[in-house]
Image (spheres, rainbow, N blue to C red):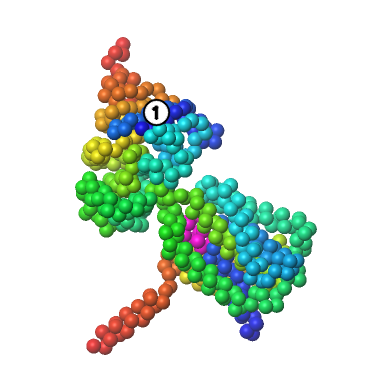
C-alpha cells in the first residue's frame, strides 16, 4: 500500500535518514522502533509532507505520493503528530469537526463521528469542553479522533504513548488494534518497543537513520539484539 | 488646535491604519511577524507617485497600481521566505525592508536619496478619500476574516502543525495573508506620497515597520477594532505630547510599555466592537437599573 524507497533526508548538514526503505501492506500495523534521534519522527514527517526529502521515492497505492501536506491528506493519509497537537482554544467537538476539513459528505461525517465516540467514550462526555483543558491522555485520544475524522486509509501515529500513565498506554494500544479492525492501515512510531512490537504485524528497527533490522514483529520480539537494545533483557548467551 | 492640524493628524492616522489593517491580518490573524512592511509602503509610494506624475494616471487607479506592485513583490518574497519558521521569517522581512530602502536610495530614476517631490496633493489624499478607502479596507478585511479563508488563517495561527495535518494548505494561506497585507501597505504608501507631496527613502526605515507592528500588538492581536483604536491613539499621542519636546518619545515608549504590562493581550486582544454588542450592553444596563429601582 505504501512503499518508501531509498529515502534520504537532511537537516542542514545532518544526514537524518540514510536511504530508508519500508513497505506497509494494507490492513496491517507496521511499527518502527528505535531510540531517540534515530529518525523515526523524521520518517513519518517526510511521508506526511511536513519534512521535505532530498532523494528517494514514496509510492502510495501504486501512485507517486504528492509532496505537499494538504494533498497527502486528500490522498487518504493522515498523521497524528507527536505531542498531542490539537487546537487548544476550540472545544472537543470543534476539534473533531476540524478533522473533517477536506470532506463534504455530511452524513458520512456524522457516522464517523459516532464511531469515534464509540471508540473514545470519554470524548463524548467532554464534547463541549475546551480541548486545552483535557488531560494528556484525553488530548492524545482527541488527536487520534481528529485524525480518523478525515476518513484516512493509512494512519501515521507518532509516539501515541508519549508521556502517558502506564494504564492509559494500555488503553491507547487497545484502541489502535480496534482502529486496525475498522479496516485501517497503521504505521506506528514508538519508543515503547515492547508494546509497539506486540501489537504489530511487521516492524522495522531504525538506528541513526538506517534500517538495521526488519521483519515479522513476533519474530523481532524474540530477537536477541532487539531484546538487548530495546526491551531491556540481557542476552542469555553471554559468556 | 486648528482644524487643519487635526484633520492632518486624522489623515496620517488613516494612512497608518491602512498598513496596520493589512498587518493585522498577517500578524493578528495568521500569526506571522513582519519588520519590513515599510518596504511595501515604499514600493507603493514610489509606484503610485510615478504613475500620477509621469504617466498622468488618476489618483485612485494610481494607488491601486502601487498596491498591486507591492503585492507582486510580496509574492516573490513569500515564495522565498515563507518556508522559514517564526523568527527567521521576521528577520527575512527586516532584511527585505532595509534592502528596498537602500535600492531606492541608489535609483536615480526615483531621485535617489533626495527622493521625489512635486507629487500632486490637490484633491488626492483628502480626509474624505482616506476615510472612504479605510472603510472599504475594513469591510474587505472583515469579510475575509469571516470567510472560510479567514478561519483557515486563524487555524494556522493557533496551531500550524495541526492545521497542516488536517489538510489546510498552510503555505498558500500564509502567502495570501502576506500578499493582502502588502497590498494594503502599498496603498497606504501611495496615500502618504500624495498627502506629503514628496517622498524620500529615509521615510521608510525599519523604525516605520516596527511602529506599525507595535500598533498591531498594542491594539490587540486578532482584533480589527483593536487595530483601529490603537492606530488612532498611537498616532495622536506623539502629537498631543509635542509640548514636551524631547521627552515625548520617552512618554510614548512608557505608555506602550505600561499598556503591554497591564494588558498583555493588547487593548482589545481577540475582541471586536460591534453595533450588536453596544446595543446589548446598553439594554442590559437599562434592565439592571430597573431591577435596582424595583
Chain of the residue displaying label 1: A
Q: Residue at x 77, y 59 (%)?
A: B109
Q: Residue at x 64, y 59 (%)?
A: B69
Q: Which one is in front, B242 or A146? A: A146
Task: Say few, some or many: other residues with alpha carbon within 10 Å of mark 1 (under 14 / 14 to 19 / 20 or more).
Answer: some
Residue lying at 76% horizontally and 55% vertically, measured from the top left: B106
The picture quadrant where one finds residue A165 is top left
Residue A55 horizontal side relative to residue A172, left or right: right
B58 vs A125, nearest the viewer: B58
Residue A95 or residue A15, whichever sits in front:
A95
Per the image, the residue denoted by label 1 is A22
Residue A29 visible in this rendered orientation of the protein = no
Secondary structure of the residue carrying numbered label 1:
strand
Would you say residue B150 sits in the magenta stretch? no
Residue B94 falls left or right of residue A140:
right
- Which secondary structure class fits the magenta region best? helix
Q: Quadrant of residue B48 in the image? A: bottom right
Residue B151, quarter of picture: bottom left
Position of residue B105 in the picture relative to residue B134 (left or right)? right
Q: Is residue A212 visible?
A: yes
* Residue A35 position within the rendered picture, expressed as x and y whole percent measured from the top left: 38, 30
Query: Magenta stretch?
Result: B23-33
Q: Residue at x 25, y 50 (%)?
A: A111
Amino acid at each position: 500500500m505504501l512503499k518508501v524507497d531509498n529515502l534520504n533526508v537532511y537537516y542542514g548538514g545532518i544526514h537524518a535518514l540514510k536511504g530508508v526503505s519500508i513497505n506497509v501492506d494494507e490492513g496491517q500495523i507496521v511499527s518502527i522502533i528505535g531510540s531517540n534521534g534515530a529518525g523515526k519522527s523524521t520518517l513519518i514527517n517526510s511521508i506526511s509532507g511536513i519534512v521535505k526529502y532530498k532523494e528517494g521515492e514514496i509510492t502510495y497505492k501504486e501512485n507517486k505520493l504528492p509532496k505537499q501536506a494538504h494533498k497527502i491528506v486528500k490522498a487518504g493519509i493522515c498523521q497524528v503528530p507527536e505531542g498531542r497537537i490539537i487546537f487548544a482554544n476550540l472545544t472537543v467537538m470543534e476539534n473533531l469537526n476540524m478533522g473533517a476539513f477536506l470532506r463534504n459528505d455530511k452524513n458520512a461525517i456524522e457516522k464517523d463521528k459516532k464511531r469515534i465516540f464509540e471508540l473514545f467514550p470519554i470524548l463524548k462526555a467532554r464534547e463541549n469542553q475546551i480541548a486545552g483543558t483535557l488531560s494528556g491522555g484525553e488530548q492524545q485520544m482527541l488527536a487520534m479522533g481528529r485524525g480518523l475524522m478525515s476518513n484516512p486509509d493509512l494512519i501515521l501515529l507518532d509516539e501515541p504513548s508519549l508521556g502517558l500513565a502506564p494504564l492509559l498506554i494500555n488503553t491507547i494500544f487497545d484502541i489502535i488494534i480496534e482502529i486496525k479492525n475498522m479496516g485501517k492501515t497503521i504505521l506506528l512510531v514508538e519508543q515503547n518497543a515492547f508494546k509497539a512490537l506486540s501489537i504489530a504485524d511487521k516492524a522495522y528497527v531504525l538506528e541513526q537513520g538506517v534500517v538495521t533490522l526488519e521483519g515479522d514483529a513476533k519474530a523481532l520480539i524474540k530477537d536477541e539484539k532487539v531484546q538487548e537494545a530495546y526491551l531491556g533483557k540481557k542476552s542469555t548467551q553471554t559468556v | 488646535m486648528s482644524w487643519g492640524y487635526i484633520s492632518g493628524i486624522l489623515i496620517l492616522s488613516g494612512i497608518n491604519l491602512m498598513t496596520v489593517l493589512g498587518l493585522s491580518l498577517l500578524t493578528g490573524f495568521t500569526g506571522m511577524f513582519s519588520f519590513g512592511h515599510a518596504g511595501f509602503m515604499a514600493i507603493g509610494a514610489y509606484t503610485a507617485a510615478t504613475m500620477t506624475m509621469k504617466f498622468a494616471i488618476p489618483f485612485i487607479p494610481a494607488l491601486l497600481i502601487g498596491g498591486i506592485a507591492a503585492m507582486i513583490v510580496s509574492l516573490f518574497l513569500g515564495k522565498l521566505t515563507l518556508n522559514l519558521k517564526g523568527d527567521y521569517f521576521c528577520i527575512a522581512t527586516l532584511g527585505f525592508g532595509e534592502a528596498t530602502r537602500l535600492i531606492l536610495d541608489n535609483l536615480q530614476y526615483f531621485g535617489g536619496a533626495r527622493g521625489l517631490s512635486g507629487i500632486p496633493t490637490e484633491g488626492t489624499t483628502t480626509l474624505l478619500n482616506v476615510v472612504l478607502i479605510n472603510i472599504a479596507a475594513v469591510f474587505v478585511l472583515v469579510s475575509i476574516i469571516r470567510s472560510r479563508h479567514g478561519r483557515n488563517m486563524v487555524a494556522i495561527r493557533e496551531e500550524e502543525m495541526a492545521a497542516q495535518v488536517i489538510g489546510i494548505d498552510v503555505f498558500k494561506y500564509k502567502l495570501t495573508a502576506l500578499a493582502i497585507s502588502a497590498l494594503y501597505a502599498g496603498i497606504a504608501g501611495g496615500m502618504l506620497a500624495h498627502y506629503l507631496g514628496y517622498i524620500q527613502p529615509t521615510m521608510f526605515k525599519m523604525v516605520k515597520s516596527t511602529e506599525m507592528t507595535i500598533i498591531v500588538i498594542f491594539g490587540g492581536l486578532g482584533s480589527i477594532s483593536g487595530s483601529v483604536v490603537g492606530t488612532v491613539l498611537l498616532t495622536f499621542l506623539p502629537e498631543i505630547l509635542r509640548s514636551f519636546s524631547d521627552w515625548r518619545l520617552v512618554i510614548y515608549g512608557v505608555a506602550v510599555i505600561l499598556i503591554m504590562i497591564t494588558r498583555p493581550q493588547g487593548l482589545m486582544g481577540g475582541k471586536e466592537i460591534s453595533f450588536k454588542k453596544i446595543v446589548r450592553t446598553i439594554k442590559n444596563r437599562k434592565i439592571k437599573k430597573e431591577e435596582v429601582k424595583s
